[in-house]
Image (cartoon, grey):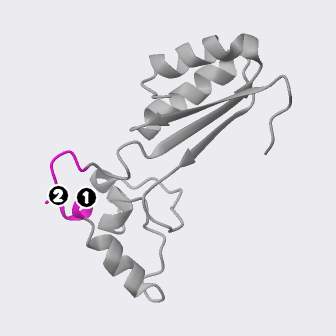
């Protein structure tokens, strides 16, 4: 994507998908329409879009809970799953402040006019985003 001459972009990182979605909703409610929400991470794998909730018996794999990788086929991609499972964030025994899914595994991208950058920035920061 290439920005037009009168457009600006903001890249905001969130540690929570809920907070990121709230920021997206608030930006769109304010009339800022060009907003995109993505998951990012340390690994070159395709991340699942499903909600993994172990309390509701909706978690298929431990990597799905920590690395958002539950939809990696267990019969085909056994080497990938083994390597993901070896990550310290999956076992719970990791380095201090190691984090999960890259600490800030959720990206909100905003494209807007220069006159609305300050407003968009305030909305993002109010929802816990880091620019």
Q: Quadrant of residue 123?
A: top right
Residue with the most extreme right position: 5
Q: Residue at x 25, y 58 (%)?
A: 89
Residue under pointer 2: 94
Quadrant where the N terminus lies? top right
Give the percent coordinates (x, y) of residue 113.
Answer: 77, 19
Q: Is residue 58 visible?
A: no
The dot on residue 89 is: 1
- The x and y percentages for residue 66 are 33, 57
Majority secondary structure in the magenta region: loop
C-beta proximity under 8 Å, tags 2 and 1: yes
Secondary structure of residue under mark 1: helix
Q: Earlier in the sequence, mark 2 or mark 1?
A: 1
Residue 61's place in the image compared with 21, above or below, is below
Mark 2 Cα shell of 10 Å, populated few (<14), some (14-19), many (≥20): few
Separation of residues labelled 2 and 1 (CA atoms): 6 Å
- Residue stretch in magenta: 88-98
Residue 109 pos. (x, y %): 63, 36
- Residue 41's quadrant in the figure? bottom left
The residue at the far bottom in this view is 75
């Amino acid at each position: 994507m290439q920005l037009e001459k009168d457009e600006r972009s903001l890249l905001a990182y969130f540690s929570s998908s809920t907070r990121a979605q709230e920021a997206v909703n608030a930006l769109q409610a304010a009339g800022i329409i060009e907003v995109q929400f993505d998951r990012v991470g340390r690994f070159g794998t395709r991340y699942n879009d499903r909600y993994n909730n172990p309390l509701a018996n909706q978690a298929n794999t431990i990597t799905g809970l920590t690395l958002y990788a539950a939809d990696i086929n267990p019969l085909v991609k056994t080497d990938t799953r083994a390597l993901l499972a070896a990550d310290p964030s999956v076992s719970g025994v990791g380095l201090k402040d190691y984090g999960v899914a890259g600490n800030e595994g959720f990206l909100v991208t905003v494209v807007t006019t220069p006159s609305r950058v300050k407003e968009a920035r305030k909305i993002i920061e109010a929802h816990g985003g880091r620019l």
